Amino acid sequence: MKSLLTEGVQLFNSGRYWDAHEVWEREWTPDRKGSDSGFFKGLIQVAAGCLHYTRHNRRGAVNKWRSGADYLRPYLPDHRGVRLAPLVDAVDGYLAAMKGQTWPELTMPRIDQE
C-alpha cells in the first residue's frame, strides 16, 4: 500500500494540485504539531500556489508559493525521501518571474522521490 505522501506526490506530478493538497492534509491533520508539520504545510502551500497559477491568480500563487517554500527550507535538501531542493529552487524562480508586468508562461514543477 502506498503512503499518502507518495499518493500526493503522484497527484501533484499529474497536475491534480487540489487533490494532492487534500491527500497531504489527511496525513498531516492527525499530527499538526509534529516534527513534520512544516514539511506538510510546505507541500500543501506549494500545491495551492500551483493551483492559483493555473487559474491566473497572481496574488494567490505568489503568496502560497512564498509561504510554501519558506516552510520547506528547514527540511532541505530532502526529507522523507522527497527531493525538496529542486522544488524550492523552482518556486524561487517562479516568484522572480511573477514580479514582471506580463503573465509568465511557467512549467509547473515535478516532485521527485528517492
Image (tube, rainbow, N blue to C red):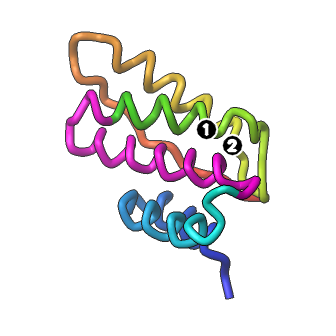
What secondary structure do most residues of the magenta stretch adopt? helix
Tell me the residue at 47%/66% (across/down). 11
Q: Nearer the viewer, residue 94 or 21?
A: 21
**Comparing labels 2 and 1, the label whose residue is closer to the camera:** 1
Q: Is residue 3 above or below residue 65?
A: below
Horizontal side of residue 91 vs 40, given as left or right: left
Part of the protein shown in magenta = 34-60
Residue 99 locus on image (x, y percent) = 34, 13
Residue 59 locus on image (x, y percent) = 27, 28
Tell me the residue at 39%/57% (across/down). 17
- Report which residue position mark 1 lands on: 71
Name the quadrant of the C terminus: bottom right
Q: Nearer the viewer, residue 5 or 97?
A: 5
Horizontal side of residue 23 vs 5, given as left or right: left
Magenta-drawn stretch contains 76: no
Q: Is residue 93 above or below residue 37?
A: above
Looking at this rendering, what residue extends furthest in the bottom direction?
1
Residue 110 locus on image (x, y percent) = 54, 49
Q: Is residue 17 visible?
A: yes
Numbered disc 1: secondary structure:
helix
| Alpha carbon distance from label 2 to label 1 | 11 Å
Amino acid, disc 1: Tyr
Q: Is residue 55 above or below residue 11?
A: above
Q: Is residue 10 visible?
A: no
Name the quadrant of the N terminus: bottom right
Residue 13 locus on image (x, y percent) = 50, 58
On the image, which quarter does residue 77 sit in?
Answer: top right
Magenta-drawn stretch contains 40: yes
- Report which residue position mark 2 lands on: 84
**Which of disc 1 and disc 2 is earlier in sequence?**
1
Tell me the residue at 30%/24% (across/down). 104
Horizontal side of residue 112 vs 7, given as left or right: right
